[in-house]
Amino acid sequence: MTELTNASLAAEHCSTLLRLARQAVEQAAAGRAGPSPRLEDFPEALRAPRATFVTLTCHGGLRGCIGALQASIPLVEDVIEHARSAATEDFRFPPVRPEEAPEIEIEISILSEPAPLVYRDAEDLMARLRPGIDGVILVSGLHRATFLPQVWEKVPHASHFLDLLCEKAGLPPRAWHTAHPDILTYQVQSFHETAAADR
Protein backbone atom coordinates (compact mmCIF):
# COMPACT_ATOMS: atom_id res chain seq x y z
CA MET A 1 0.00 0.00 0.00
CA THR A 2 1.15 3.52 -0.80
CA GLU A 3 0.15 6.10 1.80
CA LEU A 4 -0.49 9.81 1.55
CA THR A 5 1.37 11.77 4.17
CA ASN A 6 -1.90 13.24 5.40
CA ALA A 7 -5.64 12.89 4.87
CA SER A 8 -5.31 9.10 4.59
CA LEU A 9 -8.48 7.09 5.04
CA ALA A 10 -9.08 4.67 7.87
CA ALA A 11 -9.18 0.95 7.07
CA GLU A 12 -12.96 0.70 7.43
CA HIS A 13 -13.43 3.53 4.92
CA CYS A 14 -11.14 1.77 2.45
CA SER A 15 -13.22 -1.39 2.83
CA THR A 16 -16.41 0.57 2.17
CA LEU A 17 -14.98 2.03 -1.03
CA LEU A 18 -13.78 -1.37 -2.25
CA ARG A 19 -17.23 -2.83 -1.61
CA LEU A 20 -18.89 -0.03 -3.61
CA ALA A 21 -16.35 -0.40 -6.42
CA ARG A 22 -17.01 -4.16 -6.53
CA GLN A 23 -20.75 -3.54 -6.80
CA ALA A 24 -20.17 -0.96 -9.53
CA VAL A 25 -17.99 -3.30 -11.61
CA GLU A 26 -20.38 -6.23 -11.30
CA GLN A 27 -23.46 -4.15 -12.11
CA ALA A 28 -21.74 -2.41 -15.02
CA ALA A 29 -20.65 -5.78 -16.44
CA ALA A 30 -24.26 -6.96 -16.20
CA GLY A 31 -25.53 -3.83 -17.95
CA ARG A 32 -27.27 -2.51 -14.86
CA ALA A 33 -27.09 0.96 -13.31
CA GLY A 34 -25.83 1.66 -9.82
CA PRO A 35 -24.98 1.52 -7.08
CA SER A 36 -26.59 4.82 -6.10
CA PRO A 37 -25.61 5.53 -2.49
CA ARG A 38 -27.13 8.27 -0.36
CA LEU A 39 -24.36 10.63 0.67
CA GLU A 40 -25.94 11.22 4.07
CA ASP A 41 -25.30 7.56 4.91
CA PHE A 42 -21.52 8.03 4.80
CA PRO A 43 -19.03 9.79 7.10
CA GLU A 44 -17.58 13.13 6.12
CA ALA A 45 -14.31 11.53 5.01
CA LEU A 46 -16.18 9.72 2.22
CA ARG A 47 -18.35 12.68 1.27
CA ALA A 48 -15.50 15.14 0.72
CA PRO A 49 -14.41 15.70 -2.91
CA ARG A 50 -11.34 13.60 -3.75
CA ALA A 51 -9.73 12.54 -7.01
CA THR A 52 -9.30 8.82 -7.60
CA PHE A 53 -8.17 6.20 -10.09
CA VAL A 54 -9.72 2.73 -10.14
CA THR A 55 -7.52 -0.01 -11.60
CA LEU A 56 -8.84 -3.44 -12.60
CA THR A 57 -6.55 -6.44 -13.05
CA CYS A 58 -7.28 -10.02 -14.06
CA HIS A 59 -4.77 -12.79 -13.31
CA GLY A 60 -2.07 -10.16 -12.87
CA GLY A 61 -2.73 -8.30 -16.12
CA LEU A 62 -4.24 -4.85 -16.50
CA ARG A 63 -7.95 -5.01 -17.41
CA GLY A 64 -8.93 -1.34 -17.11
CA CYS A 65 -7.89 1.90 -15.42
CA ILE A 66 -9.87 5.14 -15.32
CA GLY A 67 -9.57 8.15 -13.04
CA ALA A 68 -9.30 11.89 -12.60
CA LEU A 69 -6.48 14.16 -11.51
CA GLN A 70 -8.61 16.85 -9.91
CA ALA A 71 -11.26 16.43 -7.22
CA SER A 72 -14.72 17.46 -8.37
CA ILE A 73 -17.33 15.19 -6.73
CA PRO A 74 -17.71 13.35 -3.40
CA LEU A 75 -15.28 10.49 -2.91
CA VAL A 76 -17.90 7.71 -2.86
CA GLU A 77 -19.39 8.95 -6.13
CA ASP A 78 -15.97 9.38 -7.72
CA VAL A 79 -15.00 5.78 -6.93
CA ILE A 80 -18.29 4.38 -8.25
CA GLU A 81 -18.05 6.42 -11.45
CA HIS A 82 -14.48 5.36 -12.16
CA ALA A 83 -15.08 1.72 -11.26
CA ARG A 84 -17.93 1.58 -13.78
CA SER A 85 -15.84 3.40 -16.39
CA ALA A 86 -12.82 1.14 -15.85
CA ALA A 87 -15.08 -1.87 -16.44
CA THR A 88 -16.77 -0.58 -19.58
CA GLU A 89 -15.09 2.51 -21.06
CA ASP A 90 -11.31 1.97 -21.12
CA PHE A 91 -10.68 2.09 -24.89
CA ARG A 92 -7.74 -0.31 -24.56
CA PHE A 93 -9.97 -3.21 -23.53
CA PRO A 94 -13.40 -4.66 -24.33
CA PRO A 95 -16.03 -4.17 -21.62
CA VAL A 96 -15.82 -6.58 -18.71
CA ARG A 97 -18.23 -9.47 -19.21
CA PRO A 98 -20.47 -10.71 -16.37
CA GLU A 99 -18.61 -14.03 -16.18
CA GLU A 100 -15.29 -12.17 -15.88
CA ALA A 101 -16.32 -10.01 -12.94
CA PRO A 102 -15.49 -12.56 -10.20
CA GLU A 103 -11.93 -12.81 -11.56
CA ILE A 104 -11.36 -9.05 -11.53
CA GLU A 105 -9.29 -7.54 -8.72
CA ILE A 106 -9.84 -3.90 -7.83
CA GLU A 107 -7.33 -1.30 -6.66
CA ILE A 108 -8.32 2.24 -5.66
CA SER A 109 -5.84 5.12 -5.60
CA ILE A 110 -6.78 8.37 -3.88
CA LEU A 111 -4.70 11.28 -5.13
CA SER A 112 -3.27 14.30 -3.38
CA GLU A 113 -3.48 17.66 -5.12
CA PRO A 114 -0.92 17.76 -7.97
CA ALA A 115 1.89 20.25 -7.43
CA PRO A 116 4.26 21.73 -10.06
CA LEU A 117 7.80 20.39 -9.98
CA VAL A 118 10.40 23.05 -10.71
CA TYR A 119 13.54 21.72 -12.39
CA ARG A 120 16.48 23.11 -14.36
CA ASP A 121 17.18 20.45 -16.96
CA ALA A 122 16.70 16.75 -17.72
CA GLU A 123 19.28 15.59 -15.18
CA ASP A 124 17.76 17.76 -12.46
CA LEU A 125 14.30 16.40 -13.31
CA MET A 126 15.46 12.80 -12.87
CA ALA A 127 17.11 13.69 -9.58
CA ARG A 128 13.99 15.36 -8.19
CA LEU A 129 11.55 12.53 -8.97
CA ARG A 130 10.97 10.05 -6.16
CA PRO A 131 10.49 6.53 -7.56
CA GLY A 132 7.72 4.63 -5.82
CA ILE A 133 6.38 7.80 -4.18
CA ASP A 134 5.49 10.33 -6.86
CA GLY A 135 2.81 10.04 -9.46
CA VAL A 136 3.83 12.18 -12.42
CA ILE A 137 1.83 14.35 -14.82
CA LEU A 138 3.61 15.51 -17.97
CA VAL A 139 2.17 18.41 -19.98
CA SER A 140 3.55 19.77 -23.26
CA GLY A 141 1.21 21.95 -25.28
CA LEU A 142 -1.94 19.92 -25.91
CA HIS A 143 -0.18 16.70 -24.89
CA ARG A 144 -0.82 15.38 -21.39
CA ALA A 145 -0.41 12.05 -19.60
CA THR A 146 0.09 10.64 -16.13
CA PHE A 147 1.51 7.56 -14.46
CA LEU A 148 0.44 6.56 -10.96
CA PRO A 149 3.24 5.88 -8.44
CA GLN A 150 2.55 2.14 -8.82
CA VAL A 151 4.07 2.27 -12.33
CA TRP A 152 7.49 2.67 -10.72
CA GLU A 153 7.22 -0.98 -9.61
CA LYS A 154 7.50 -2.08 -13.25
CA VAL A 155 9.56 0.87 -14.54
CA PRO A 156 12.02 1.77 -11.76
CA HIS A 157 14.43 3.93 -13.77
CA ALA A 158 13.47 7.60 -14.11
CA SER A 159 14.69 7.96 -17.70
CA HIS A 160 12.66 4.97 -18.93
CA PHE A 161 9.68 6.08 -16.84
CA LEU A 162 9.74 9.51 -18.50
CA ASP A 163 10.26 8.01 -21.97
CA LEU A 164 7.13 5.88 -21.57
CA LEU A 165 5.18 8.81 -20.13
CA CYS A 166 6.05 10.91 -23.18
CA GLU A 167 4.90 8.09 -25.46
CA LYS A 168 1.64 7.85 -23.53
CA ALA A 169 1.16 11.60 -24.08
CA GLY A 170 1.72 11.17 -27.83
CA LEU A 171 5.21 12.70 -27.80
CA PRO A 172 8.59 11.33 -28.89
CA PRO A 173 10.13 9.26 -26.07
CA ARG A 174 12.93 11.74 -25.37
CA ALA A 175 10.75 14.85 -25.43
CA TRP A 176 11.22 15.25 -21.67
CA HIS A 177 14.96 15.54 -22.34
CA THR A 178 14.75 18.32 -24.93
CA ALA A 179 11.39 20.12 -24.70
CA HIS A 180 11.31 20.96 -20.95
CA PRO A 181 7.64 19.94 -20.47
CA ASP A 182 5.66 21.00 -17.43
CA ILE A 183 5.85 18.34 -14.70
CA LEU A 184 3.49 17.97 -11.78
CA THR A 185 3.71 15.36 -9.04
CA TYR A 186 1.23 13.88 -6.60
CA GLN A 187 1.06 11.07 -4.08
CA VAL A 188 -1.59 8.42 -3.51
CA GLN A 189 -3.13 6.25 -0.86
CA SER A 190 -3.74 2.97 -2.64
CA PHE A 191 -5.55 -0.13 -1.41
CA HIS A 192 -6.90 -3.24 -3.09
CA GLU A 193 -8.87 -6.38 -2.59
CA THR A 194 -6.76 -9.04 -0.90
CA ALA A 195 -9.17 -11.89 -0.18
CA ALA A 196 -12.65 -13.18 -0.89
CA ALA A 197 -13.73 -11.45 2.32
CA ASP A 198 -13.24 -8.13 0.56
CA ARG A 199 -15.97 -9.01 -1.94
Image (tube, helix red, strand yellow):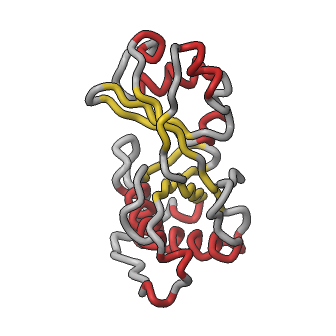
Taking 169 as reference, is 103 left or right? right
Question: x and y percent of residue 46 in the render?
Answer: 53, 75
Question: x and y percent of residue 138 in the render?
Answer: 43, 31
Residue at figure coordinates x 53%, y 39% from the top left: 185
Residue at figure coordinates x 39%, y 41% from the top left: 92
Q: Residue lying farthest left?
A: 142
Question: x and y percent of residue 106 in the render?
Answer: 58, 59
- Between 158 and 26, the one lying in front of the other is 158
Taking 60 as reference, is 138 left or right? left
Q: Does residue 199 appear anywhere in the picture?
A: no
- Between 153 and 102, the one lying in front of the other is 153
- Location of residue 11 by image quarter: bottom right
Q: Does residue 122 appear anywhere in the picture?
A: yes
- Location of residue 35 by image quarter: bottom left
Residue at figure coordinates x 40%, y 53% from the top left: 70
Residue at figure coordinates x 56%, y 40% from the top left: 135
- Between 36 and 59, the one lying in front of the other is 36
- Between 161 and 85, the one lying in front of the other is 161
Q: Quadrant of the C terminus?
A: bottom right
